Image (tube, rainbow, N blue to C red):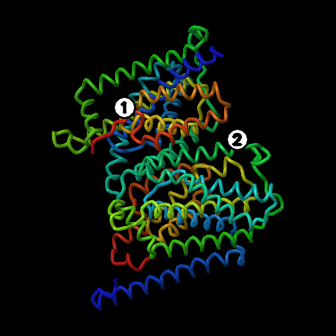
Amino acid sequence: MSGLIFNGLVNGVIVGALYALLGLSLSLLYGVLRVVNFAHGELVIAGSFVAYLLFHSLGLPPLLALPVAAVGFFLVGWGAYYVLIPRLARSDDPESMSFLLMYGFSIALAAAMLLLFGADSRSIDYSFDPISVPIGPVNVSTARLVALGVTVLITLAMGAFLFRTLPGKALRAAAMNREAIQIVGVNIVRLSALAFALAFGLAGVTGVLIALVFPAFSPFSGGEYSIIGFIVIVLGGLGNPVGALIAGVFFGVAEQMATVFLPQALAQIVGFAILVATVLVRPTGLFGFRALR
Amino acid sequence: MSEALPASASADRAHGERIYRRLAIVLGLLVTGYFVTVPLLGLNLAFHFYMMLWITMATAFNISSGFSGYMPFGYVAFYGVGAFTTAILVKKAGFAVLAALPLAGVAGVLLSLLMAPTLRLSGIYFAIVSLSLAGICRLTIANLPEEITGGSFGIQLGSRAAPVHAFYVMMAVMLLALASVLWLSRSRLGKALRAVRDDAEAADMMGVNVGWVRLQGWMMAAFFPALCGGLEAWYTNVVDTETAFNTLITAKTVIYAVAGGLGTVTGPIVGAIAMSWLDELVWRRFPLINLLILGVAVMMLVLFLPRGIVGTILRARPQWRRFIP
C-alpha cells in the first residue's frame, strides 16, 4: 500500500507539473486580457500532434519538437490576437463573449484536427534509454522524468521572465490593474498580444510534454485538459500565475491519490468536486489574492 | 404610474403596448400555424421536431442569460437529467410517457434548486462552475447501477414510439415556453430580473428580493430543457449518457440563442430557425466539415454579430424596441 501511495505521489507531482503549466498559460491570459481560453485543451492537443508529425514524418525526437512547437504556436498566437480580440471589445459583455468565442474556436480546432488526423487515439512510440528509472520503491518512466525536468525549466524561465524582465513585470502589472499601466505609458495592445502569444506558445509546449507523459491523445481529448486547466486556475485564484503553479501540483497529487484510494468512477468526480467546493467556499482561490480593478 | 404621465405620453404608451400585443399574437399564430401543418403535409418531421426543440431550449436559455445575466455553460445538465428521469420512470417504474414528462420537468427544477448556491457567483466563475456541475451530473448518472440507468448501453423505451404525438407535445411545450417568456418580458418578475441583472445592489435598494427573483428565473430556465430532454428521449426511443449529456447540446443552445439575440422574445426563435436551416443545409452538403463550420460560425457570430440578428436590428432602430416582443 505504501508503495502505491509513493507511486501516486511521484506521478502526482509529474502530472501536477503539467497541470501547473496548463494553469500558468490560462492564468496569464485571464490576468492580462480577462479572456478564459476555452480552446486551451485543443491547442495543447494540437501541440501533441505537432510532436507526432515531426517524429513520424521527419524522425525528430519530441525534445527537439519542443522549440518548434513553442515558436510556431507563439507566432500563431501573436497573429490570432489581432484577428480575434480587438473586435471583442465592442460587444456589450466582453468577458462572456470571449468565453463563447473561444468555445467556437475549440469546436473548430477539434473538428480541424479530426479532419486532418482522424478520430483514432495516437501515441508517439519514442522511448528513452533506459525506459524507466527506479526511484525508491517504484520505477518511473524516463519520459515522465524528462517531461518533469522540462516543465521545471520552463517554469523557472517563465518565473525569471515575469519577475526579472520589464515586459514580464508589465504583464504582471497589467493583470493587477489594466488601466493604471496605460497611464505609465505601456502599449497595452502590444502587451496583450504578447500575453496571447505566450499563452499559445505555452500550450504548444504543454502539448509536446503531454504526448510524452500520457499514453495517448485524440482530437477530442482536448476538453479534459481545458477543464483541468479551469480547475487549476480557479484553485490558484484567477489571473495569479504563482497560485496556478501551486494549485496545479496540488491538483495533480490529489487526482493521483484519488485513483489510489477511490474507485475509478469516483476519482473522476474528485476534480469537479474540488472546483465547485473551492468556488463556493473561497471564490478568490486557495491563495486569496484579489486583483485590483 | 401611467396616471402620472401626461395624456399624450400615456396614450402613446398604450398604443405601443397594443402593437406589442398584436405582434405577439401574430408571432404565436405564425409559429403555431407553421408547425401544425408539418405532419399534415408530410414534411420532414424530424427536422421540424428538432427545430422546435431548439427554439424551446434557446428560449429557456434566454431566461437565464438574457433576462438574468447568467451564462450556464453546463445547460445540458437539465436536459440530460430530464431525459433520464423520463426514461427511468417509463421503463423501470411503468409510467405513461405523458405522466413522466411533467415529472422530468420537476426533476429539472429540483436540480436547479440544488445548483442554486452557484447563483451568487457571476460571469466567468458561474460559467466554469456550471460546466463542472454538468460534468458531475454526467459522471454520477453514468456510475449509477446498471439496473437503473442501463449503464453504457443506455435505456431503450421500447414500443412507446409515437413520433407524431411527440411532435405535437413538443409543440405544446414550445408554445408554453414562448408564452412564459412573453409574459415574463412584460411582468413584474421580468422587470425585476432585468434590474437585478443590470445592478443587483440598486435593485436591492429599491426593494427587490434579489435572491428570490434570481431563483425564480433560474427555475424557469431549468424546467424547459428538462422537458426537452424527456421529449427527445421519447422521440428517439433511447437515452444514454454520451448523447444526453453531450456538450454540443449546450453549444447549440447557446449559439442559437446568441445568433438571434439575447434578451428579446423573438431573438431565440429567429436564431433557432435560421441556424437550424443553416445546420441542415451545411450538414446535407458537407457532412464531414459540419462541426468545423459550426465552430467557425460561432466565432463569426461573436466577432461580427455579438448582439444577434434581432439585437442588431433593434440597435439600428431603437424606436422598435417597445413593439418587438
Q: Residue at x 73, y 62 (%)?
A: B234
- Report the side of B183 relative to A26 (left or right): right
Give the alpha-carbon distance from disc 2 to disc 1, as whole Å.
35 Å
The residue identified by callout 2 is: B143
Q: Is residue A276 visible?
A: yes
User: On the image, numbered disc 1 is attached to which residue?
Assistant: A241
Q: The N terminus of chain B appears in which quarter of the rendering?
A: bottom left
Residue B262 horizontal/vertical position (percent): 44, 64
Q: Look at discs 2 and 1 and give the one toward the viewer.
A: 2
The residue most toward the left is A184
Secondary structure at badge 1 equals helix
In the rendered image, the quadrant that contains the C terminus of chain B is: bottom left
Q: Amino acid at mark 2?
A: Asn
- Given the image, what chain letter belongs to the residue carrying mark 1? A
- Mark 1 burial class by Cα count in 10 Å: few <14, some 14-19, many 20+: many
Specify the subunit that label 2 lies on: B
Q: Up-down: is B4 above or below A17?
A: below
Crowding near the residue tagged with mark 2, few <14, some 14–19, many ≥20 C-alpha atoms within 10 Å = some
